[in-house]
Image (cartoon, helix red, strand yellow):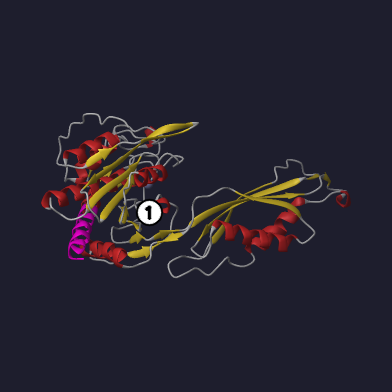
Amino acid sequence: MSQTAPTILDFDLTDPIALTQALVRCPSVTPAEGGALALLGAVLNAEGFSVERPVFSEPGMPDIENLYARIGSEGPVFVIAGHTDVVPPGDLAAWTHDPFAAEIVDGTLYGRGACDMKGGLAAMVSAAIRYRRANPDAPGSIAFLVTGDEEGPAVNGTVKLLAWADRRGERFDHCLLGEPTNPAAMSDMIKIGRRGSLTGKLTVHGVQGHVGYPHLAQNPIRGMVRLLAGLEESPLDAGTEHFDPSNLELTTLDVGNPATNVIPAQAKAVFNIRFNDLWTPETLAAEIERRLREAAGNAVRYEISFEPTNAVAFLTQPGRFVAMVADAVEAETGKRPALSTTGGTSDARFIKNYCPVVEYGVVGQTMHQIDEQVATADLVTLERVTHRLLATYFAAAQHA
Ligand SMILES: [Zn+2]
């Protein structure tokens, strides 16, 4: 447990723009804490939240600081999740604004983490503070689950923080994760699930030899072409109600043969599959192995292996909670957001083991890019959506 450093809070804590600026100015490139969690801890502490700062370790990996905060002692517990770590800024000279200065020009706030996801976290913290100030006797609890290890190996972050909270008897009813889910506008989409990810490595063995004497050799490229055709011959599935069809993408194909008169000994391919809720990594691996066996017959010698994965597909069934989030977005933006399961993986895949989780955040167009930015108007919208959601959620709890 690390001590919360004294932090000077010389801005309005219910102002999501000021709070985003303060967070962006903390250089919290994974695994550095950079003062970001200390700042959040000080803010939440000042508003009556109890704040814990567990540090998790793993041999051979840097220690990671995390934050858990809660106000209220009863259920339901509405948990807001996120991360304060950011990816490196890259070429500093390429930025038009210092990536850790949080400058605002014409309604755009520039900086590393502006959209992914200090802006989202700041807006949700501001909303929670505004809500609790106006409703000090509100039923239930609000909790924050914040990690400093989302952009890194994600080993000493959300997974361990959830288990840590669970051991302490913390129970969560619903979770809002503030990753930047919107492609272009704040009314675009909320994410109600994520696809899973499975990576396969395929090696085809041949017999090396002279191209002029092919009967003495065996070309592995011919076998590889045959296996890959077998893998892609028919779609893995047709998609499901809330998911696109699962998709296999070849990411590399290597023979590494510099000679034009040599038949190579081996060919290697790597592919990644983003899969929907019809599959688990195990059933999908079995299907891939079946397709390869069928394509190979007795003619191709090959090996297939799969990288270990914790990225399973999951869906938060559209119901009362999902509708509540969509209602709040529609009320503040004037448009009903799509319920989406597209994109990469996120920490929601770990949270879903503890409670239903929905993701909604600012526009993510510039995440991880040079000149990462967020529209200050979007921070205000996200603060309002979150505030409305908290008010509806706890009002419903009161009348339940
Ligand atoms: Zn993120």
Q: Is residue 159 above or below residue 276?
A: above
Drawn side of residue 160 relative to residue 10, left or right: right
- Across and down, in percent, residue 175 comes to 31, 54
Drawn side of residue 113 relative to residue 19, left or right: right
User: Which residue appears at 29% of the width and 51% of the height?
Assistant: 79
Image quarter where the C terminus lies is bottom left
Q: Is residue 394 magenta?
A: yes
Q: Quadrant of residue 291?
A: bottom right
* Secondary-structure class at tag 1: loop
- Across and down, in percent, residue 320 comes to 29, 67
What are the residue bounds of the magenta stretch? 382-400
Query: For this rendering, which residue is in front, 110 or 3?
Result: 3
Drawn side of residue 215 relative to residue 229, left or right: right
Drawn side of residue 104 relative to residue 115, left or right: left
Instruction: Give amino acid for label 1.
Output: Tyr
Q: Which residue is mark 1?
A: 354
Q: Quadrant of residue 26?
A: top left
User: Which residue appears at 25% of the width and 56% of the height?
Assistant: 76
Q: Is residue 134 above or below residue 32?
A: below
Q: Using a 10 Å C-alpha cutoff, classify the residue at mark 1 as few (fewer than 14 neighbours), some (14 to 19) or many (20 or more).
A: some
Image quarter where the N terminus lies is top left
- Across and down, in percent, residue 242 comes to 42, 67
Q: Is residue 344 magenta?
A: no
User: Which residue appears at 54% of the width and 61% of the height?
Assistant: 247
Query: For this rendering, which residue is in front, 72 or 55?
Result: 72
User: Which residue appears at 43% of the width and 56% of the height?
Assistant: 343
Tell me which secondary structure the magenta stretch mostly adopts.
helix
Asked if one can make out residue 149 in the rendered structure from this viewpoint, the answer is yes
